[in-house]
Image (cartoon, grey):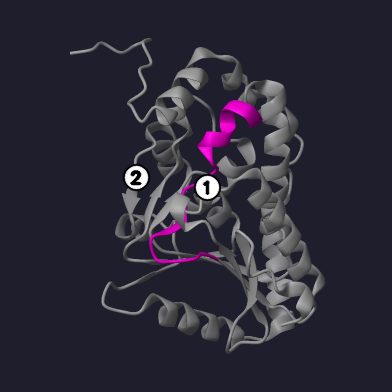
Amino acid sequence: MTKKEDHSVSRVQLKQHPHFASVRFIVLNRPDKHNALTLTMWEQLLEFLEACEDNPDVRVVVLRGIDEHAFCAGADIAEFPKLRANRESAKKHKTVTDLVTKRLANLRPITVAAISGICYGGGLQLASACDLRVADDSARFAITPVKLGFVYGPYETRLLMRIVGEPKAKELLYTGKAITAQEAEKIGLITARNPSSHNFDQFVDDYLFSLLQAAPHAQQLTKQIFHGLQEAGTSLLDEQLENLSTQALDGSEYVEGIQAFLEKRRPFYAEGLTKM
């Protein structure tokens, strides 16, 4: 690993795999908050993704959490009252998160999300942007914006829908419910699941080894074909859909959702709900 790539003291780390020289780990390192992503962490992610893109020796990038308890709990909701206080400030914050997600989705190397523990919200957004997702049996998945009074954006919704199909994407987004690794495997959200009796690090290494057996240039061409097929005809509606996704930030539901989260209570959305 070059000196430039050594960022081991950061909340986001870039590391070379100890055995596979062409593999890089990008590690989320905020275990006390289940790796919830601050704005600074999003910016660091973008920096490290660019470094991997620019290094021709990198074939595979693995995104993972620092320990087995969490892949990523999503964006740091504690920052929302300041960074997403209204539609305009939310657009600025989302510009950064969208840049990271799109950079990850379009990265030249093959990308793998190695998921153990919690994978919620923005964490699942990042995992969905990866080419492949492998998970430990401990993994739990959820997308919770509707519980907080705001809306998952069109780009990340499209990524999810491509992976699990429209009906399952709707169920996950409409309810915000959490699902297990077994359920995620059943609906195609994850590519492979590690049985609970196996070491997850070894499972990931075995998976990487199988990827590295293939011809590198053929893999790159194949990835370009997939990307071309996925992106054809999708960009024209993005601006209109982004406007829809930010409308919720002007309403009372968003205020109630974030306030309830910070106060550690259940939000109450009065319309259409009768208390028993």
What's the CA distance linking mark 2 and mark 1? 15 Å
Expressed as whole percent of the image width and height from the top left, the position of residue 98 reads 69, 44
Q: Quadrant of the N terminus?
A: bottom right
**Which residue corresponds to the image point at 71% horizontal and 80% vertical from the top-left?**
218
Question: Which quadrant of the figure has residue 158?
Answer: top right
- In the rendering, which numbered label is found on residue 116? none
Q: Is residue 134 above or below residue 238?
A: below
Q: Amino acid under label 2?
A: Ala
Expressed as whole percent of the image width and height from the top left, the position of residue 23 reads 64, 79
Give the mark, 2 or 1, whose residue is nearer the N terminus.
Answer: 1
Question: Which quadrant of the figure has residue 177?
Answer: top left
Residue picked out by circle 1: 160
Q: Is residue 129 left or right of residue 274?
A: right
Q: Is residue 179 left or right of residue 5?
A: left
Does residue 234 show up? no
Q: Is residue 80 left or right of residue 44?
A: left
Residue 67 in magenta stretch: yes
Label 2 Cα crowd, 10 Å radius (few <14 / some 14-19 / many 20+): some
**Which residue corresponds to the image point at 44% horizontal and 30% vertical from the top-left?**
262
Label 1 Cα crowd, 10 Å radius (few <14 / some 14-19 / many 20+): many
Q: How many marks?
A: 2
Residue picked out by circle 2: 178
Expressed as whole percent of the image width and height from the top left, the position of residue 171 reads 39, 37
Residue toward you, 94 or 13: 13
Dot 1: what SS?
helix
Dot 2: what SS?
loop
Q: Which residues are magenta?
A: 64-84
Question: Which quadrant of the figure has residue 157?
Answer: top right
Residue at the far front: name it: 9
